[in-house]
Image (cartoon, rainbow, N blue to C red):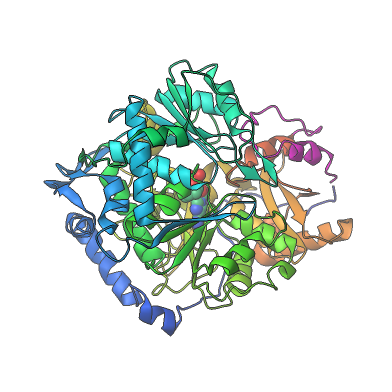
Amino acid sequence: MSTVPVAKPAPSSSVAAKNAHNIDSMLKEKRVFKPSAKFAAAARIGSFKKYEKMYKASLKDPDQFWGKAAKELTWFRTWKKVCVWKPPFAEWFVGGKINASVNCLDRHLDGPLRNKAAIIFEGEPGDVTTLTYQQLHREVCLVANVLKKHGVKAGDRVMIYLPMIPEAVIAMLACARIGAPHSVVFSGFSAEALKERINDCGAKVVITSDGGFRRGVALKVKRNVDEALLGAPKVKSVLVVQRTKQDVTMTPGRDYWLHEETQQVSSVCKAEPFDSEHPLFILYTSGSTGKPKGILHTTAGYLLGCHLTTKYYFDLRPEDVYFCTADVGWITGHSYVAYGVLSNGGTSLIYEGAPNHPEPDRFWRIIDRHKVNIFYTAPTAIRSFIKWGDEWLAPHDLSSLRLLGSVGEPINPEAWMWYYEKVGGKRCPIVDTWWQTETGCHMIAPMPGATPLKPGSATLPFFGVDAAVVDDNGNETEPNVGGKLVIRRPWPSMLRTIYGDAARYRKTYWSEIKGCYFAGDGARRDKDGYFWIVGRIDDVLNVAGHRLGTSEVESALVSHPDIAEAAVVGRPDELKGQAVVAFVTLKNGVQAGPGLKEALRAHVAKEIGPIAKPDEIRFAEGLPKTRSGKIMRRLLKEVAASPTGEIKGDTTTLEDLNVIAKLKQAED
Ligand code: WT7
């Protein structure tokens, strides 16, 4: 390790003392991109003034705003009260009766949408299947009737463990149709993870498949279910979709082929009305510690949130082909592959496999082949594309794209610029959407035809969302002073509780800042009120009295032309409190070396200041990520703090165990 300049001592001025618990923000991004006149002219919200006016009105009288918006959904009975708020428990559209599957399907069957594609599916081997709204409706009714045949009643939980195939959406809507809350588990999760979730929610039916195709192999999905069920005795039936036709073990009396079962039931399944607050699904989110939390969402409010944000943020039109790359196992797959897209009568393109199979241009090939108009992906994917090289885009015509989305973590300004120029051809707005499993739908994001964009900022809140950055006492921080990101009033698509653990719900989300929802992110607002997420509060570094968000240091590293990806963590340091340790991966073809380390330190010093200069830089082949692509900083902290690079922590959610083995060898 080379010497680092001795840090200046912790500042003791009154300003610093006052901000002791705030986060110092150093990254300054100056670029601004206004919506093009052409995009604005056709958009639903075509000027910033219109957004501001609607936003102000929505906060002034939320009941009026949400009540009016909710009329866009189809109801069996209208609500009596828009919101009943007994903190921290909310009920929305109380007294209303609704069915989510009717909103996603039946209501489109009387008009021109009937024969339009609801789902375009491309399998990894290249097979394409299209389901019109009419066809999707029929499939959903059949599966709903199969569920009933297997004894599923309103309120019963159904587990869905499926790869990215149309049956995943069909299964979700079939559950919604009969009021059985679904719980989708990402099909890449282990048997152990599946078992734990089945038992936590007490599911009695599992919908799965023989497998799915990923990187050219048929995954053994059913085998994981068999293993999980050894420890989940309450499951009565397993319904198996045939996708790969590989051999699987079928346990008589428990396991049934879904395509055989659907032959035995009627294709008519009347949709029942359910209370607005009827549970729609439970989705487990791991968090960094402790047992997974079963996030509970209910019907009407969730659906309204998905419907409106899809309509306004993606400006989705029936003629668009919309491609979201998220798996149905995550909230993005629930809200923006299924519910929000279908309730708007959109066309959702679903792709089964890996982005680099058979080659790293698969997504560009799909966009070209299906003439995709709206593309929604994650910064981690964008950084992979950059790493793989621009030459993979060149042969493909991406001119059908008109809007790009980003979700999952702060998008580094350099990745933003690449996405904007190389994928969007400088014509597509980038809608950077900040939200969470818990929030159900987008909370902070730019209106594509209205909000001037700043690379790296999720910009401003959605209608009715009272977002703020506050200090520990709940007071709003000054511009550019970091603090905690909170939401100060309830919103329709908020989680209702943690399934079976209301005390944990209260403690996790509603106890940090009085009267506010807090789910762990640090942020700052700039002088224009734009939100900049600086990372998870738990990851904030404290370097010689300066509190630095990880994402700013990472963005500075990624803005160096040789760097593909970076993760920054703190290591205990006697002198400074914490030292900055950076794990970086290089772009293809770049050589690591001591010269590069010095160059990177100098680069960070120039971009955000000497205080953020990494004390240690490790070149890694890959970074440890969860299966949804989030960097596991907890593991990196352990690697950074231990002289031998040992880690003892839980690695069950890790995508690739080899990464850790390689990290230990990564030389400093
Ligand atoms: C956490 C939520 C929301 C669906 C996918 C992830 C981070 C998400 C952004 C963004 C900065 C973001 C936050 C948030 N995050 N989107 N656009 N900019 N950070 O859902 O697994 O529940 O994770 O992801 O830290 O709290 P999730």
318, 600: nearer the viewer: 318
**Where does residue 127 sit, x and y in percent of width and height?**
59, 54
Q: Quadrant of residue 146?
A: top left
Picture residue at 88% right of the left edge, 56% below the top: 594
104, 257: nearer the viewer: 257
Which residue ends up furthest to the bottom in the rendered image? 37
Picture residue at 64% right of the left edge, 42% below the top: 633
User: In terms of secondary structure, what is the magenta stretch mainly?
Assistant: loop
Which residue ends up furthest to the front in the rendered image? 263
**Where does residue 329 sit, x and y in percent of width and height?**
50, 41
**Where does residue 270 sit, x and y in percent of width and height?**
23, 41
545, 41: nearer the viewer: 41
Whether residue 126 is visible: yes
Picture residue at 59% right of the left edge, 24% below the top: 249
How many marks overall?
0
**Where does residue 418 sit, x and y in percent of width and height?**
64, 69
Q: Quadrant of residue 363?
A: bottom right
Q: Quadrant of residue 191?
A: top right
The answer to whether residue 368 is above or below residue 531 is below
Q: Is residue 663 magenta?
A: yes
Whether residue 495 is visible: no
Q: Name the side, left or right, on which 502 lies relative to 187.
A: left
The answer to whether residue 199 is above or below residue 46 is above
Magenta span of residues: 642-668
The answer to whether residue 28 is above or below residue 96 is below
Q: Is residue 522 magenta?
A: no
